[in-house]
Image (cartoon, grey):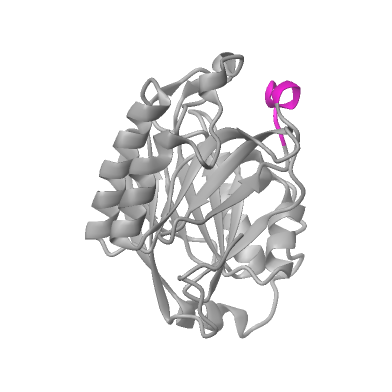
Amino acid sequence: MTGLPSVSSEPAGTLTVATVQYEAVEGVADNAVQHVRLIEDADAHGARLVLFPELSLTGYRLDLLSLDESWIDPADARLRPLREICRRTGITAVVGAPCRDADGSPRLASLVLHPDGSTERAFKSHLHGHEKELFEPGVGPHVMVLDGWRIALALCFDAAVPEHAGAAAAGGADAYCVSGLYTRGEERRLDLHLGARAMDHRMFTLLANLGGRTPIGESCGLSGIWSPDGMPLKRAAGNRTEVVAGLLQRSTLLRYRHGGPVSGGGRRDI
């Protein structure tokens, strides 16, 4: 990827982030329009990073992947409104899409859209269910840098595998950002995944969950931000579309990291 204007040698003392719980609509172009509106909302909260759920630009519509229009390339014209709002606000947005790698490999991906027009891509490492028939897995977490903060990206089931977050922590991650789809009945599992990964590695964790009804069940909501002690800081109120904004403080990271790693760090298998 090319140079990113948000990268600095000295990490900022704070980073304002927003996780977007999002109820997808039909069609990539219409979802892109809704993404723009929600990024504008996040901008009103001062967000520098906006995290959307897994497959946010298409919804969890694996049944439509036989259609070429369901696949999104970083140069896709349908992303232009998103790129423009990122340029105008200075926000880095992480959006979910099916895309093809340079060699044609099908990937379940997060596209990172930076204000300067550059793009990074993160691929889901741990595919689940029918995804295994449609996508090739990525290798390990992608870690990007924003205002000196090291941000690791995960997609849904990645968060269920302790080694994925462990690799992110080994790469110096300050925050572990999960774009996911957790459904009703998975509330406890969600809490354990996000809380344990935060506590085990003394890093912030974030979840952007798909909202509303999905082809695999009703969303349980609960998008939000977890502290390095494993406790939720802010959460969505329901399971519909909602922007959850919060402030990550480096002093909090340092306070929790001062005592060293948690016993059994990264080895919980939940």
For residue 108, which quarter of the picture?
Answer: top right
- State whether residue 138 is above or below residue 230: above
From the viewer's perspective, is 66 left or right of 4?
right
In the rendered image, residue 142, in percent from the top left (x then y), is placed at 66, 56
Q: Quadrant of the N terminus?
A: bottom right
For residue 222, which quarter of the picture?
Answer: top left
Tell me what residue is drawn at x 77 percent, y 65 percent: 264
Outermost residue toward the left? Answer: 44
In the rendered image, residue 191, in percent from the top left (x then y), is placed at 53, 47
In the rendered image, residue 79, in percent from the top left (x then y), is placed at 42, 39
Relative depth, front residue between 69 and 161: 69
Relative depth, front residue between 22 and 5: 5
From the viewer's perspective, is 169 left or right of 87?
right
Tell me what residue is drawn at x 43 percent, y 82 percent: 13
From the viewer's perspective, is 266 left or right of 75?
right
Relative depth, front residue between 76 and 50: 76
| Residue 130 drawn in magenta | yes
Read off the magenta span: 127-134
- State whether residue 204 is above or below residue 65: below
In the rendered image, residue 241, in percent from the top left (x then y), is placed at 32, 36
- State whether residue 195 is above or below residue 199: above
Q: Quadrant of the C terminus?
A: top right
Tell me what residue is drawn at x 48 percent, y 36 percent: 76
> Does residue 23 show up?
no
| Residue 78 drawn in magenta | no
> Does residue 211 show up?
yes
From the viewer's perspective, is 76 left or right of 36?
right
Relative depth, front residue between 258 and 119: 119
